[in-house]
Image (cartoon, rainbow, N blue to C red):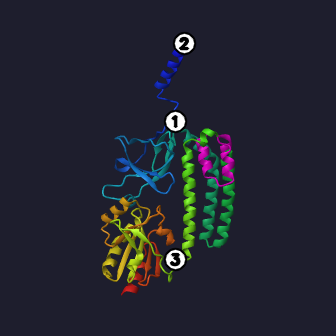
């Protein structure tokens, strides 16, 4: 009877503790940021594989400028915090400071300071980060001092190759010293989630050495999803870079433009080859790209100016279908539009070796690449006048 009574009492204690044996999936960011406009902040939550933004939240501030923001998906999350644009304006149209914060399930981070210089406290992850930063910040300051000195010499006219070689040597030494100090922190703090965070960024064989030091709790804790996402991102970047390097062999002025088929605004397939017989401008852009948006009015003028001689095919990159369609509607884009299919195996931006936005590729009536121009440049419009007048 006594054992039964004790068992019941134990269950009651666990219940009153809110099932404390379970791991919390909630992460909290709270505090106060000085000089915030429009009474709100924007939180852009990165995808787990860092391939873009997963979702965007609005953080409302109370009358005293305080806020509380909660995530409850059980994953380590990288979140970018910035200001709320004024009514009728896009985020890229106003200048805001921003910062990145790591939100850990089971931890609450207290924030103060400004968007440009935030201060974090209250979280074990961030207290460990502060201790680790104390070990490596002098190394960063030293490298920055070297960089500033080399820039002065470069501006004074010294040989660029010599300056670059000196910087590479300084960076190599900095990397060795940084990894030595960071590994020392991991050795001294094997049960710290921040130790795993450091370890995730190491290359091999250092990463395996550091992983062997971590406790099982840490290895199976919240930072595991960060490590897996970072590994996936690095692999995807490597594969994309290989695709771009391969594409560069075939994407050049005078060579045939690689054909492709992507879905238009109505969800119907549209191929480049179907436009053969007139000049076609492939406009690689995105609703998130400020320079791309700024160039739309000028492009409209030229689309009207050379109506019948010129077709423009906008290829939206890095956008969701909704973002793409909303941007086309908002800016009243009159030309043909398709959306790139990065995740569906039809990444046309890689096939055309695109690394900057906007990129405009002019394809002649025979289907050959006539001109490639990166950025919003007068050169593009001068070239159109030259070939179409």
Which residue is denoted by mark 3 in the rendering? 251
- Marks 2,1: beta carbons within 8 A: no
Residue 116 seen in the figure = no
Mark 3, Cα crowd under 10 Å, few <14 / some 14-19 / many 20+, is: many
CA distance for labels 2 and 3: 82 Å
Q: Main secondary structure of the magenta part?
A: helix
Which residue is denoted by mark 1 in the rendering? 23
Q: Secondary structure at mark 1?
A: loop
Which residue is denoted by mark 2 in the rendering? 2
Residue at point 56% right, 66% down? 241
Question: Is 262 contained in the magenta span?
Answer: no
Q: Secondary structure at mark 3?
A: loop
Mark 1, Cα crowd under 10 Å, few <14 / some 14-19 / many 20+, is: few
- Name the image quarter holding the C terminus: bottom left
Q: Quadrant of residue 282?
A: bottom left
User: For this view, does 23 lie left or right of residue 294?
Assistant: right
Q: Which residues are magenta?
A: 185-214
Residue at point 56% right, 45% down? 223
Give how far across and how far down residue 191 sits, in percent.
62, 39
How many callouts does the rendering have?
3
């Amino acid at each position: 009877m006594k054992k039964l009574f004790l068992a019941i009492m134990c269950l009651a204690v666990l219940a009153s503790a809110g099932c404390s044996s379970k791991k919390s999936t909630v992460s909290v960011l709270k505090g106060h940021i000085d000089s915030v406009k429009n009474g709100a902040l924007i939180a852009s939550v990165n995808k787990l594989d860092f391939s873009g933004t997963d979702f965007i939240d609005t953080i409302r501030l109370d009358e005293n400028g305080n806020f509380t923001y909660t995530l409850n998906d059980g994953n380590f999350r990288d979140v970018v915090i910035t200001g709320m644009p004024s009514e009728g304006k896009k985020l890229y149209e106003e200048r805001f400071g921003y910062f990145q914060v790591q939100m850990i399930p089971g931890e609450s981070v207290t924030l103060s300071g400004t968007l440009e210089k935030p201060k974090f406290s209250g979280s074990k992850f961030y207290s460990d980060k502060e201790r680790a930063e104390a070990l490596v910040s002098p190394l960063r300051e030293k490298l920055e001092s070297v960089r500033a000195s080399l820039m002065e010499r470069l501006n004074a006219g010294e040989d660029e190759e010599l300056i670059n070689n000196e910087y590479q040597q300084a960076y190599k030494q900095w990397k060795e010293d940084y990894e030595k100090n960071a590994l020392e922190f991991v050795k001294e703090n094997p049960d710290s989630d921040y130790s795993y965070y450091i370890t995730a960024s190491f290359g091999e064989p250092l990463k395996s050495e550091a992983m062997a030091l971590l406790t099982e709790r840490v290895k199976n804790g919240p930072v595991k999803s960060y490590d897996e996402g970072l590994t996936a991102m690095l692999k995807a970047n490597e594969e994309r870079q290989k695709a771009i390097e391969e594409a560069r062999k075939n994407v050049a002025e005078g060579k045939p433009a690689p054909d492709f088929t992507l879905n238009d605004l109505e969800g119907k397939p549209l191929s480049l080859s179907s436009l053969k017989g007139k000049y076609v401008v492939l406009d690689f852009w995105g609703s998130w790209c400020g320079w791309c948006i700024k160039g739309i009015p000028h492009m409209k003028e030229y689309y009207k100016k050379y109506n019948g001689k010129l077709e423009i095919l906008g290829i939206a990159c890095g956008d969701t279908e909704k973002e793409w369609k909303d941007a086309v509607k908002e800016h009243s884009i009159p030309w043909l539009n398709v959306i790139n299919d990065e995740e569906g195996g039809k990444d046309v931006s890689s096939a055309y070796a695109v690394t900057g936005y906007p990129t405009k590729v002019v394809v002649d009536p025979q289907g050959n690449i006539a001109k490639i121009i990166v950025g919003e440049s007068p050169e593009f419009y001068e070239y159109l006048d030259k070939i179409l007048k």
